[in-house]
Amino acid sequence: MPNKDVFEFKNVTKSFGHGKDVTVAVKNLDLAIKDQEIVTVVGGSACGKSVFGKLLLGLLKPTQGELLFRGEPIGDQIEHWQEVQMVFQDPFTCFNQFLPIRRQLEASFGVFKGKKPSAKEIKRRVDEGLMAVNMKPQEIEDKYPFELSGGQMQRMLLARIFALRPKVLVADEPTSMVDACVRAGILDYLLKLKDELDMTIVFITHDIGLAYYVSDRIFIMHDGEVVEAGDPDQVAFSPKNPHTIQLLEDIPEIHREWIQR
Amino acid sequence: MAVFEVKNLSLHYRTRFGKRIHAVQDVSFSMEEGEILGIAGESGCGKTTLVSGCMGLFIPPLYPTSGDVLVRGESLMGRSPDEVRENVLSKKVSMIPQGAFNALNPTRKIKDLAADLIMSHEKDTVSRKDLYPRIRERFSILGMDTDKVLNSFPIQLTAGEKQRSVIGISTLLNPGMVIADEPTSALDVSTQKKIIGMIFDLLDKKIFSTMMFITHELNLLRHVADRIAIMYAGQIVELGTTEQIVFDGRHPYTQALMGSIMSVDENEKDKKPESLEGAPPNLANPIEGCRFAPRCKVAREDCKHTEQVIRMVGDREVRCKYAE
Amino acid sequence: MKLFKNLLKEKTFVFGFFTFIIVILFAVIGRMFVDPVTYDNSVAGTYTPPSSLALLGTDHIGRSVLPMLIMGLGSSLYVGLLAGVIATFVGTLLGVYAGFIGGVLDDIINMVTNLFMVIPIFVVLLLISSAIEDGRSLTLVAVIIGLTAWTWTCRSVRAQVSSLRTGDHISLARLNGDSTFKILFVHVLPYLFSYIFMVFIIQLATGILMEASISMIGLGPVEGVSLGIILNEANANFALIDGAWWAFFPAAFLTTILVFALYTLNTSMEGVFNPRLRKE
Amino acid sequence: MLKHNPTLKYVINRILWYVLTFFVAITINFFLPRIGGSDPVTLTLNRMSSGMTPDRVRQMEEDLNVRYNLARLDEDGNAIRAKVGADGNFVRDAEGDLVPDEKGRVVRRSLFNQYLNYLGMTMRGDLGMSIQQDRPVAEIMRESIPWTLALQFPSIVIGWIVGNILGVLAAYKRGSFDKILFPASMLSTSIPFFVFGMVLVYVFAIQLNLFPAYGGYAWEYTPGLNMGFIMSAGYHFILPFLSICPVMAGGQAIGMRSMSIYELGTDYIKFSKTLGIREHRIIKYIFRNAMLPQLTGLAMMLGQMVGGALITELIFSYPGLGTALLDAVNQNDYFVIQGGALIVAIFLLIANFTVDILIGIFDPRVKAGRVEG
Amino acid sequence: TDDRSFGYPREETLYVGGLQWGSPTTFNPLAWWSAFPIMEGGNNTVTYEPLVLFNSFTSEMEPLLGTIYEESNEYISVIMNSAARWSDNRPLTAEDVKYTYELARDNSVLYSGVWEHLTDITIDTVNVDTLADIVLPDDHYGQHERITFHMEGAAQQNPLAVYGALQSVRILPKHFFAEKLEELDGDFEALRSLTLGDSPIISGPYQIHNYTNERIILKRRDDYWGNDALFAGEEPGPRYILHPILEGNSHFNLALQQGRIDVTSTYLPRVWTRRDMGVQTWYEEQPYYMAGSIPTLVLNTEHEELSSKYMRRAIASAINYEDVRDLAISGYSEDIQPGLILPFGNEKQYFSAEDAEKYGTSFDKEKARSYLEKAGYTSVWHDDGRLSHMENEDGEPVRSLRIMCPSGWTDWEAIVRIVVRDLRRAGIDAYQDFVDQGVYRESQPVGRFDMILFTPAPELSPTTPLSRLEGVMSSQFWAPIGDRMEENYGRYNNPESDTYNPAVDSLIKNIPLITNQDSLVDAYRKLNRIFMKDQPAIPLAYRPEQYYQFTEAVWENFPHADNPVGPQLVPTIGAARNVLWKLRSTEKGE
Ligand SMILES: Nc1ncnc2c1ncn2[C@@H]1O[C@H](COP(=O)(O)OP(=O)(O)OP(=O)(O)O)[C@@H](O)[C@H]1O
Ligand SMILES: Nc1ncnc2c1ncn2[C@@H]1O[C@H](COP(=O)(O)OP(=O)(O)OP(=O)(O)O)[C@@H](O)[C@H]1O
Ligand SMILES: [Mg+2]
Ligand SMILES: [Mg+2]
């Protein structure tokens, strides 16, 4: 049932602290994310992107307004996470350094609680996930997170997604920590995954090039507000909001004049 | 005579358990007056280490292995640290460090740090009275909110202000040559642009004229550098003019790097970014043959065994036997 | 294991470790040769110098110093160990709790910590000793030392945990459906482990020193013998004035070397666990 | 004003904290000795009751109860006595009131009433009467504290400064300086400082007879501003001072060394070096920044100085709070113990508070940001 | 010049030690705890003076403010010395004496106990010339005041106790105290709280001169009345007496051997090793000191296990007294004899070696075991020969007995350790219980202990040895465990039990009234026999009434066995004060 809304924000505000110390991280959001859509949230640092992502996961609760998931407020978190999963910003800190990576991948199925597949099934699905990110399962057998490179670890996070097969994926700067050379590969995996699972993907990034490359729709965030939303071409080539225009101008592009000398 | 010259420089870290990490291996280049040399490479390839070497700054566990660094013809190696400090640092060469967030002494006001710098170098010639007006003048030339910035502790400044203060301080003594180590990474794109603008401003004002600019963002280098050197696993794999490197890389790694750039450009809309498998070699282990060979798409059998040397391809330097 | 191998490459660690082991062995093996009931019987006159009868001489009431040392070392280690375990346990527990759960509880724990910081141990001992009818046992003294020494452990653990708390691997664990309890034990504690271990070593040393100090002012345990008690009795009975170095020096030496070994251990581990502390 | 002045807010926040802590400390201080049932009346009675008839002992008991503020008084200020039953408890009438009885037992104030009384007294600076010394505890404290401060404060502060300087230098200079200093410091902190004190006494006082082994000044002098006394006090000061200072310095040197090594690796030091800033200036940077966390250690040491004073003063028969407390312990004079404990708590609070504020002032990182320590 | 800020010349100063431990606070003789030289303990007599002095070496009462004239079981009368003067030059009269005693009758003071034995005090005047058997110094004959202490009808008629008071109660200036009390509206507590440290009105030869927390200094009074009246115009030797205040014995002893203190009353172990540093004691050889008291192990007879006299005797036979003497107290004791009477000195007359042989227990392991068996207990041993526990007749395990002793009293701790060792070897399950002094003191009167170290009547006085026996045997004021009992902490001879032996209390009550020497010896023997048979406490060793050691570097002529110019006491105490007039400076002081 494509094109039905997966997430719907109704005037959502999230703030931290109180009184004089209040920080409004996300302000009056009114938007919807459709099923099987790839949207990208782009913005400068501390503009509220990660908070936005965590709201989707239910890791943070809106201070004001309502956030609907498939038409209803997020109830039980565990159930929510059976459908919605996240790739975190920094792969180096994502895994417990004291457990073999494989065990951690398998532990991910804990989210299914009672409906957990059999141990054998879990093993199979993890193997599958690993294969999908081009890692041979035996390569990481008994390996600990610190024995892997950043790129490999980022792929482990994605393998986890492949194994869990969530309906919705929130990817917070999924390539921030890897080298340019590896980045394209990772994106390819993700898009492959989306096709395979009919996923909805929310990318969070500050790299407009990446947003342009992968998304169906782009949200430009500034100071907790979405200042512009639209399809990539429209946002990239005919931006309307001054903040968007400024942002695009400030990004050094190989093919565009950037600064006067 | 070259303003700055690095000759076959190799540097290593010594780990706690006696291992050596050869973070910089056989690097050579030279820079002429007024030139901006960009150095690019992925994280961990030895850029910052190279900068330390260029500054003659050997804080354990970093040690020089071999090679030399010449500033206006004078060698840095083998000179007493004190003499280098006295004659070269801040006067002939300055550095803008990576991560300016932490580069300022958190318990010292900006103006005091600036004063310390001047006093360290011109103790005998400068009078205390002139100190602060001079600092204020320089900072106001650079278009900063002088009073606020100078009288603040670093924590009271925004990231951009901090980075500008760092630049202001390191160029205070008109060094002529500046080595900038990722001066803008971790900054907002808008702030980044302002900082680059400021650097150009300094160049225009002739406060310094020659610059080594280090970054992992090729997009940025394209707009800043005259020449670019690409580093991989501690070595320079290709060095040429900006145009050559960005649009016409010859080394397979340069090509991969450029191919991976995603850009917002109508002409490139359908271009699919390339990716590379694998990761750079672990520098702690001895490496046989070409360091890039394991990831190289065009590597041949002998690449895995024979070390590659820099050679000229046209007017550029490439560290690949088979590059055309 | 790998960590241990790394540690063994560290000269100071090896020194500290083996010194500590030797001291422990001295206590353990020595104990096999000491009769726990008659060890403090008088075997000769007052302050007789080392001889075949009493290898390390005798003390002011003619007890052989060597078995006293062995038993005293045992008691001191026991006090240090118990106090260390208590201090580390309480400190870690409260620190982890405060750092991880946060909120009002954090504030309360913080206050209790502050409070305990301003209640010096000997005051507690002073005040409590009048409350204890049966006199202070070794265990009681250890418990009191432990219960007054946990504060800084709590503080630093709390700081570490609250920085860990926001780490992505915790969020990921939650996404995996792990319970808070499991998160604490599987995803937080292991990160603190090396730190806690180091803290424990320091607490152990502190416990031993503390026992010696409070025994010195006569507030130590009133049963058995400990290194502190040996020192106290030697001091009170003119061992120094009488030149009976054997009644005093071995206990002083053991205390010092034990603490020295523990400190060395701690510092060398700090060097390995915290790579910023470079080695020449 | 509060809103706009983070420093003031910080200070007020801290003050509130400390007031609260102080209050709880007083409370603990009051209740701890009382749970044990240690009783000043019994204690005093024991001393003089031998050979007296029970009647006279009862009269003394009453006097002492009044004296120690424990008895419930009638309008005339006499202790109330009530009837005691066969079970040893007070007899109560139908209304639950006590039955007055000339021959009965002295009725004491309730614990809570005593507590309120104690609070009130403490607030007025009245720490009660010493059981054994027949004079106000506050006076005992007033007499002894200067000695403790005069010995401990310089020893600790100088030890701290010397230790920190050595620590920075060891971190900065490395090489043989570090190789000698580091194990030496390690050893010096490992030596229990009373052991060190005893060795000093043994070598310099008993064997060499160079310094006095006991006392704060020669007995022939009277404290005051006279040369004889001052010289004598200075002479007696040396050994105790030496017994504290190196141990303090050693511990500090180690802490400072590792803090400094940490600082040495920081970006700002590297940057300062590349700027070519002079060495001594850089050492100053390191010293100052590494020192700030060490300040907390100083606070702790200053706070614990009375604890340390107990032993030092015992070993050297040195006058001061420690000696006063030890005497009190030996004689179970718990009003003095209590008073001393309170003073110690106040010390600790003041030390911590001062350091909190100092750090707030010296460390802009704290001033600008954190409110909670 | 004000000599307070200058040094006190060494050769003119007598340094004494061991009498004052904490800071000096009050010099008020009415206070509960006053400082040297006022303090009750040790009975200092150089500042305020008692009517008479008791010489514990000769066991004689020496005249001071008065001379004992008539003594009987009904009254004791004292002729006042008309030369006695207060320091403000007013005469010291019988009125002062009466006032001093009556103050104690009307208020609680340290010596109030004397009124248990007194009914009245009267004053009259007599002509000494007409009194045949009184010898007064020189020209003091003629009309004299006489003060009579009446005992007839007192609940406890006890002339010995009154003698005790005469030599220990120091007379206060009525004109000062009565006036002060009036000023204070009769508030005795307020009077008691005065410090009185600044040149108080005294009668003795040394005035409080200057004091700090570190020392107390007394200065010789050149106008002391007794110089002429008692010492033929001589002055005491030392111009100053300085008592330093130090933490712990060791510092006093160090100071002694370094020649910085002349005489101390501290316990100094292994004194022979300090001989070559000039430290001397009463005897040159073991036991070094003249014994005056007997530390005992008091057994709580109300406790089931210790209620059997066989058990108590088992314990007494198990202890190796030689070890106790040699290891714990440096051998400072003669061989201990059974019973509570010293087998030498003045008490020797009451001691019977025959009784001791017949009824006493001595160290004998075999006997200990057989007594234990008689008491109905069996020892259970581990395989390796260590004691496990005891069982009673029903085969039930019995708890360990605890020996209470204040922690930090090192010589006592050592005694207890040896006793524990010996008891366990003999199969008696006991352990040491080192507690804080406070706990120790509080446990004593209420009987909360199994066994406890205790020295009854530690000082020699006219009441010893009776007070010693009374201290562990009298059940006159019997109180159950939990209530205060001021003597007999072991609750021996419970008057409510069927085993009550009324002879004990009646002997204790009668001995003071016996005037016939033979009957007296007989009565003491009887009492001591009961003690030996019932063993309510176990004497462990002999101890001097005060340790006493001196060096003659600065002052010569201290009393010792070969030069018994006074009792074995620091010369500010009791009759030892007279030694002050005999001390001669060696002129060797710096
Ligand atoms: N747990 C939190 N408590 C308090 N403030 C928070 C918290 N999380 C985020 N914030 C604040 O909310 C704002 C938005 O933060 P967020 O992490 O969403 O930024 P971001 O856009 O992800 O930035 P970046 O690009 O640096 O990741 C920031 O000002 C941040 O300080
Ligand atoms: N103190 C050190 N001890 C040991 N190895 C080090 C140390 N510092 C850096 N290295 C190693 O040296 C290599 C080069 O590091 P360097 O910091 O120069 O890289 P870089 O190119 O500046 O990377 P980045 O882009 O992340 O700043 C890396 O492999 C790193 O692991
Ligand atoms: Mg973010
Ligand atoms: Mg770098």
Image (cartoon, coloured by chain):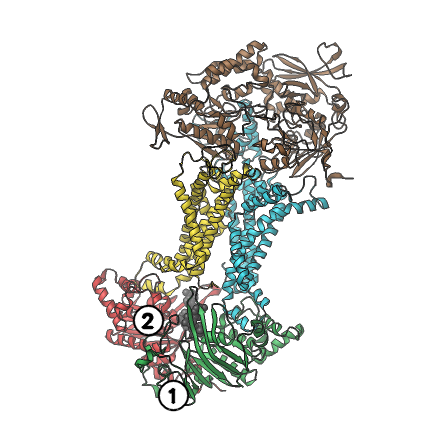
Label 1 to label 2, Cα distance in Å? Answer: 30 Å
- Chain A colour as displayed: red
Q: Which chain is yellow?
A: C
Q: Which chain is cyan?
A: D
As drawn, which residue projects farthest toward the front?
Answer: C52
- Chain E colour as displayed: brown
As drawn, B184 above or below C148:
below
Q: Which quarter of the rendered picture does the N terminus of chain C lie within?
A: bottom left
Q: Is residue D212 left or right of residue A83?
A: right
Q: Is residue E329 left or right of residue B233?
A: right
- Amino acid, disc 1: Asp
Is residue A76 visible in the rendered structure shown here? no
Q: Nearer the viewer, residue D185 or B104?
A: D185
As drawn, A115 above or below D333:
below
- Amino acid, disc 2: Gln
Question: Could you tell me residue A145's position as x and y percent?
Answer: 34, 65
Chain letter of disc 2? Answer: A
Tally of numbered tags: 2
Question: Could you tell me residue D215's position as x and y percent?
Answer: 63, 41
What label does residue A152 carry, if any? 2
Is residue B3 visible in the rendered structure shown here? yes
Q: Residues within 10 Å of mark 1 (few under 14, many from 20)?
A: some
Q: Is mark 2 within 8 Å of ligand 2?
A: no
Q: Nearer the viewer, residue E500 or A8?
A: E500
Q: Which chain is green?
A: B
- Residue D68's image quarter? top right
Question: Could you tell me residue D174's position as x and y percent?
Answer: 53, 63
Question: Which residue is rendered at x = 54% and y = 61% of the image?
Answer: D176
What label does residue B248 carry, if any? 1
